Amino acid sequence: MAGSSVSRADRQGQILAAARKVFAQKGYYRAGVADIIKESGIARGTFYLYFNSKRAVFDAVLVDIFGRILEQIHSVRVTDPWDENAVVEQVRGNAQRLAAMMLSDPGSVRVLFAEAAGLDEEASVNLVEFYDRLGQWVSASLEDGIRLGIVRPCNALVTAHALIGSLRGMLWAWSIGLVPLDEATMVQEAMNLVQAGVLCRPAT
Amino acid sequence: MAGSSVSRADRQGQILAAARKVFAQKGYYRAGVADIIKESGIARGTFYLYFNSKRAVFDAVLVDIFGRILEQIHSVRVTDPWDENAVVEQVRGNAQRLAAMMLSDPGSVRVLFAEAAGLDEEASVNLVEFYDRLGQWVSASLEDGIRLGIVRPCNALVTAHALIGSLRGMLWAWSIGLVPLDEATMVQEAMNLVQAGVLCRPAT
Amino acid sequence: MAGSSVSRADRQGQILAAARKVFAQKGYYRAGVADIIKESGIARGTFYLYFNSKRAVFDAVLVDIFGRILEQIHSVRVTDPWDENAVVEQVRGNAQRLAAMMLSDPGSVRVLFAEAAGLDEEASVNLVEFYDRLGQWVSASLEDGIRLGIVRPCNALVTAHALIGSLRGMLWAWSIGLVPLDEATMVQEAMNLVQAGVLCRPAT
Amino acid sequence: MAGSSVSRADRQGQILAAARKVFAQKGYYRAGVADIIKESGIARGTFYLYFNSKRAVFDAVLVDIFGRILEQIHSVRVTDPWDENAVVEQVRGNAQRLAAMMLSDPGSVRVLFAEAAGLDEEASVNLVEFYDRLGQWVSASLEDGIRLGIVRPCNALVTAHALIGSLRGMLWAWSIGLVPLDEATMVQEAMNLVQAGVLCRPAT
DNA sequence: CATGAATGAGCGTTCATTCAT
DNA sequence: CATGAATGAACGCTCATTCAT
């Protein structure tokens, strides 16, 4: 009814938030529906009013996280006589938004990097699709850059997954406490890697 | 000893091999003790004679993989007036051995990257420890390099995890079929990233 | 009353009709209140305004079917010097009306023969009562017949249930598709059984 | 092992017996696996060591009952110049064995007549198959009899189900307490029905 | 040492019923 | 009267672990 105190979407959101927290803490398999409903403060049956199954909530959690990530990534626009600084700044902007989002939401990081794996092949389809899309997008961007002479020639798809992996590496290490990390540091080190690799320039 | 037809260590190894195979195929949670004993050809009770629990075998599998990985990584030795080519070649050697091992053992890759996560905090202690050790080692190497002027100044620990992550990114994408990968490509792209990052040299 | 657009009895009837359909299709246990309200086009809560429980509707469905069956069965009236043809014709009339009703309403047959069973003792009280009443009535009729010399002496109650069972047997086999059946055939075979049994008359 | 105190078959039998009792008391749907294991005195998991599912035990119970029933029914052998008494005696033998078995095992009767129905179409396949087989067999016997002039011409299949139904009617009424029944009475009334129907001979 | 039958806590899911609106 | 979101006991089933042989 119009006068119900809690709307359907709100309840869904409430359960989703509880699920995100529980999955982040325990992972998909160790988390039980019991944990989610306890965290939500709802009854067992109510859960199934809003989600068809445990996997359905998990998928919803993943999709939600994916969406928020993809929102942070903007295409890099290049002027005709291209300006290195402008390009670098746009890439830095992507890194900055991603870092800000991730570092402020450790739960999502844990779900995304630690928990989504290990499901049966069919169940992790969402995850694989996400990384496929992301990899394709980064790869296409790299190829544009190569064509324009901004990016050095390379195997774009492999390099794309290496770059994505380097971000994952930093965030994952941070999420399990191996490394302290703040937005500025993450952005700076990522940009350094992108711009210069690790080694010093050879003298010549 | 004392005339037993199969030594204790051999039986352990037999079970370990079966477990590695099973965990690689199904992941920790979807794999059952039933699968492992079927693959081993031993009885249920026998399994518990050699391992205290399902988690114990999994830990042993992880430790085994970790050991084989760490064997591939050699410290970089630097001559006094240091020779860039010598350094790069030693790093390339590490990358090459790692790539060869990983690409020839997709099972270990799956266990390592996809299945080790999602365990309870205490259970994943091995995994965390491994990445911690690996991160520390890479970080220390970077710091040595910085001191010698080989490596550009950076936050060594964060950069270490970024580098490790970039390798994981390539291997993971390969292991789930998002990207074709061979040893030469992986080594080349990894080295390029290390040496030059992604962007072209600025014109100066 | 008082201007309500739909009377209480009508609503009850509407739900009852829906329930009959649903129970016929799915049986008592596999049918859910959800099915009944969907078929009725009413809300969940409304259902409980007209029936106290799922069992209550089922009982009502049974009572309704019982009533329609009992309506078809007329007492056999016997003239003083009794006329065999008249008696047989009246029995045949009962059989005919029953057959016509049953064969035109397979849903009721399913509910009656297949679904009513398996309930707890207390729940099936209606069913037992019905068969008790029916058995008593047939038995009393047989005893009248015996007294008049129309019916051969026998254990009337046992024979009554055997006769009822023979009709149930035909209808049940038909309802699950084991046998094709039309009104004429059913009546004829039932009457033959009543009049002559199965075997040929001995020669003498 | 050879020395286990309880053989696999015995355990199966123990569970089967418990299940038969529970299904007889409560019916398929109201009976729970919990009831069966309580009656068996075994643990939950043990049940699933011997039967794959609740339905599997139920099917096994049905098959067991069917087998014991079919054992009681012998084909009627007819001599060339046929002897009415010999035929009747053989039919009576079948009736007697059936009656003895059924009346000594009320649980089976309840399962068979009251509980087997109401399952989903596919689940009751066993039951339908059984009645189909039984009907076919009786029908074929009737047709043999008709050819030989022993049985009066009739729709054999319909009559077969009517005869089976008459036995079911007596037994069902007995099993729920509507009628007292002993072996002699049941056999006598069944034979009377078969031999002479219900009505007295017309005067002619 | 080796075995495998037995265990039971725990899982994800269903559904008849209630009650605040 | 009518609604439908909320409830929670109960269900069938799994599986890591134990222990008598």
Image (cartoon, coloured by chain):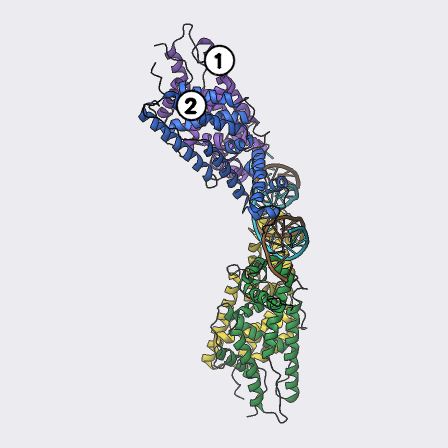
Chain colours: A yellow, B green, C purple, D blue, E brown, F cyan
Asked which quadrant contains residue B7, the reply is bottom right
Measuring from the top left, give residue A175's x and y in whole percent. 65, 68
Labelled pair 1, 2 in contact (Cβ < 8 Å): no
Q: Does residue B105 lie above or below B44 as drawn?
A: below
Residue C30 at x, y percent in the picture = 52, 39
Residue denoted by label 2: D89
* Secondary structure category for the residue under label 1: helix
Give the residue furthest to the front. B3
Distance from the alpha carbon under mark 1 to that under mark 2 = 28 Å
Quarter occupied by the C terminus of chain D: top left
Closest to the observer: B72 or A38? B72
Specify the label residue C143 is tagged with. Answer: 1
Badge nearest the viewer, 1 or 2: 2
Q: Is residue D156 above or below residue C93?
A: below
Residue C7 visible in the snapshot: no
At 41% from the left edge and 24% from the top edge, which residue is drawn? C99
Please indicate whether residue A148 sits to the left or right of residue D29 in the image: left
Instruction: Decide which of C115, B7 is in the foreground and name it.
Output: B7
Q: Report the number of discs.
A: 2
Q: Identify the secondary structure beneath mark 2.
A: helix
> From the viewer's perspective, is residue A94 above or below residue C185?
below
- Kind of residue indicated by mark 1: Glu
Report x, y in % for residue C89: 38, 15
**Residue at mark 2: chain:** D
Is disc 1 surrounded by few (<14), some (14 to 19) or many (20+) residues within 10 Å?
A: many
Q: Disc 1: which chain?
A: C
Q: Which residue is most to the bottom?
A: B81
Q: Is residue A191 visible?
A: yes
Amino acid bearing label 2: Glu
Give the quadrant of residue D162: top left
Residue B3 placement (x, y as % from top left) = 62, 67
